Amino acid sequence: MPRESLLISTLVELADNLVDHFDVIDVLTVLSDRCVEAIDVDAAGVLLASPQGDLQFIASSSESIRTLELFQIQSDEGPCVDCYRSGTAIVNRALGDAEVLWPRFAPMALAHGFRSVHCLPMRLRGRTIGTLNLFRTEQGPLSDEDAVVAQGLADVATIAIIQHRSAMDARTLNDQLSHALNSRVTIEQAKGKVSQATGCGMDAAFDRLRAHARSHNARLTDVAEAVVTGAFEPSALDLGAAERSSRA
Amino acid sequence: MPIERLIDIYEELARRGRLGAGGPTLCVVAAEFIGVSGAGVAILPSGGLMTSLCTSDGVARALMDLELTVGEGPCVDACSSDVVIAEPDLDSPQAPGWVSFAPLALAAGAQAVFGVPVRIGAVRLGALSLYEQHTGSLTESQSSDAYLMASVVGRAVLAHQAGAPLGSIEHELARESPFDYAVHQAAGMVAVQGAITVGEALSRIRAHAFATEATASALAGRIVFREIVFDALSREWRETWTTTR
């Protein structure tokens, strides 16, 4: 698809998702996936700060990024941590010569096949609530256009977090952040159940939960919660789209 | 600086003594840390009725008893919520839902009450209740401290359920991250393996980690890699030596 059509369809898809009752984890996962398609990057992930201000993983386009993001949080080192602390973007940072800056993170990212990284702050009323992180397997800089689009998508991610379910009850930013992070934990619990009950891997378990939510017009977190509490059996998940698309 | 804030809580808990069930320490520290007049913790045993774990003072105890008796109030609501329940002015309530609770809570000495859900993902463990002797909402930093304290309470409740020896709980809390995703995935897996609830699985994982002197996080990693399973019939953990996946 030409780039402009891709961008337009991405924005329409996100706008569609942002009305009514949407699931924040699902939207941020869509956003990560679309970054990879619409911008010249190979992987994307979103970190969110808890109400107390520590970064947590919330969504990503691939498992290898998730590992890198978690590593940064655990070791308290890396571009996403720096971007969050300073509230300013880190763009076009080559990983090959970043070993002084990030002695543990840089070699690990290189080992995962990445050569450069970009981190964009998600800012709201002077407070940084998270970061959108983009990884490339090439070293060259992002085009100016890509950089603008990336910051635009980071802003959409911010809106997604503060908007979700806010029409239903007045919530503070702390409520929104706490809710989003707890949603992620619920989804991990559900992934464990689905993985054990159906013998699939954690990634496939996530795809199944997501596919079921989509085909039943339900929120991902609600499906996950029903699985965790036992209201819904993992074996009854509609495998539909996830399985079909992975076979295609 | 959240880590420092967390360390403050643990040091205060350790200084004041143990986190035993019924002991007031946890609630006293919660009230001081968040900066409110008093606090209480109610727990929801799986499938059971809400019960009081601890309260910081006489008013908090009266409020808790009241909620358990009339079946309404901030703790009751917070137990089924995922955000803080707030009533900044019991005299002229914004949401007039607590017909029995509100006048009695005023008489007991509270002007404002709050309920903070204590949950880990979809596992609802109970609620932290807070009261103030004056009207007014929680400030932004109080609400962020309330969420932080609720996560400490959640882990203390789990550790207590898992039979952690008193005195080791603070230490266990301090070295465990609430967002350790492997632990949550493992809890889901163990729930299916043992045909138990995810809440019980969380507590079983901790109990086995204590018993084998491992961290919950390390044990969770082995569960996710299917090196160890919880057997539904024997109710015991079993190492798997198969190489098949």
Image (cartoon, rainbow, N blue to C red):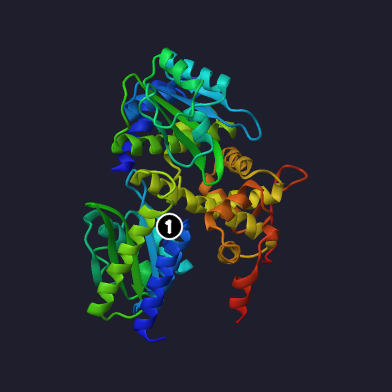
Q: Where is residue B184 shown, x and y percent of the image?
A: 54, 50
Q: Quadrant of residue B7?
A: top left
Relative to the observer, which residue lies in front, B26 or A31?
A31
Callout 1: residue from which chain?
A: A
Count every numbered label the image shows and give the total: 1
Q: Which residue is mark 1?
A: A58
Q: Where is residue A150 shown, x and y percent of the image?
A: 30, 71
Q: Is residue B237 above or below residue A209?
A: above
Instruction: Decide if residue B238 is on the left or right side of residue A48.
Output: right
Relative to the observer, which residue lies in front, B170 or A142?
A142
Q: Residue at x 42, y 61 (%)?
A: A18
Q: Where is residue B36 shown, x and y percent of the image?
A: 34, 25
Q: Is residue B18 above or below residue A32?
A: above
Which corner quadrant holds the C terminus of chain A?
bottom right
Which corner quadrant holds the N terminus of chain A?
bottom left
Q: Is residue B109 above or below residue B115?
A: above
Relative to the observer, which residue lies in front, B25 or B93?
B93
Instruction: Decide if residue A163 is on the left or right side of residue B186.
Output: left
- For label 1, the crowd category at 10 Å Cα-Cα, with few meaning under 14, some 14 to 19 and many 20 or more, is many
Q: Is residue A169 above or below residue B69?
A: below
**Residue closest to the far right:** B233
Q: What's the residue type where badge 1 is placed?
A: Ile
Instruction: Decide if residue B62 is on the left or right side of residue A170.
Output: right
Q: Quadrant of residue A93?
A: bottom left
> Could you tell me which secondary element the residue under label 1 belongs to?
strand
Q: Residue at x 56, y 38 (%)?
A: B210
Q: Where is residue A127 shown, x and y percent of the image?
A: 25, 51
Looking at the image, can residue B169 be seen?
A: yes
